[in-house]
Image (cartoon, grey):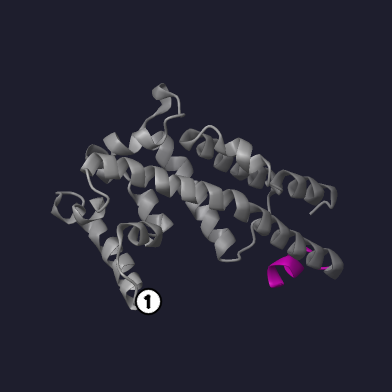
Amino acid sequence: MDKYFNRYPNDEEKAILHYKTNIELSEAFYAVLSMYEVAFRNSLNRELTEYFGTVDWYLKIASIPGLKNLNGSIQTAQKHIANRNETITANKVIAELTMGFWVRLFNAEYELTLWKPLRKAFPYLEKNQRQRNNVSAPINKIRDFRNRVFHHEPISWNLERLAETHERIIKVMGWLNEDLPKVANEIDRVPQIIKNARQLDI
C-alpha cells in the first residue's frame, strides 16, 4: 500500500479507495486481455502451421538460420509439459509458449524469415499499414501492460494513458478478427470503471 499512501499522504481513505479501484480495473482488463491473447496466439499459430506445413512447426525452427535462438523458449515449454507428466502435443506446446515468445517473433531480426507468414495473421489491418514495425510496437506495449496486470502491479496512475491502452488492445484485436471487438464489448467493463475512477478524482 505504500505507493498509494505516498500518493495521498494526508488521506488514508482515498489511498485505500484508489487501491481498490486499481484492483477493479485490473479485473476488468482481464477479460479483454484474455480474448486478445488467445486470438493473437491462435492467429500466429494458424499462419505458422500453414507456412511450415505442419502443426509441429516449432520443431523446424532449430534448423532454420537466424531462428535457432528461439529454440530455448520452445524447449522450456516442452519441459514444463513433461514435468507435469503430460504427453507433449502441438496444442499443449502452443498453449505453453509465453506471450513474450509470440511477441518476440516480430523483432526486426526475424523480419526476413517470419514476417511474410505472420503478416497474414492480421487480415483486417489495412494493407498499406501491414508492416512489421506497425504491428511490433503496439503488441510490445500490450505485452508490457499485460504483465503489469497479471503481476498485480498498479496500472491506474494515469487514467488517460490507461484509456489509450484499452483502445490499443481493442484495435489490435480487430486486426486479428473484425468481430472480436464487438464480442469483447459485451463483457468489457473497462470504460465504465475508468469513468467511475475519473469521478472519484484518483
Residue 185: x %, y % from top left: 66, 40
Residue that carries the numbered disc 1 in the rendered image = 84
Residue 21: x %, y % from top left: 75, 59
Residue 86: x %, y % from top left: 34, 72
Mark 1 secondary-structure assignment = loop
Queried whether the magenta region covers residue 68, the answer comes back as no
Q: Nearer the viewer, residue 184 or 157?
A: 184
Image quarter in which the C terminus is found: bottom right
State which region is magenta: 1-10
Residue, x 61% and y 55% (percent of image)? Answer: 30
Residue 153: x %, y % from top left: 61, 64
- Disc 1 crowd rating (10 Å Cα; few below 14, some 14-19, many 20+) is few
Residue, x 73% and y 66% (percent of image)? Answer: 4
Left of 143 or right of it: where is 196?
A: right
Query: Which amino acid is tagged 1?
Result: Arg
Residue, x 42% and y 30% (percent of image)? Answer: 123
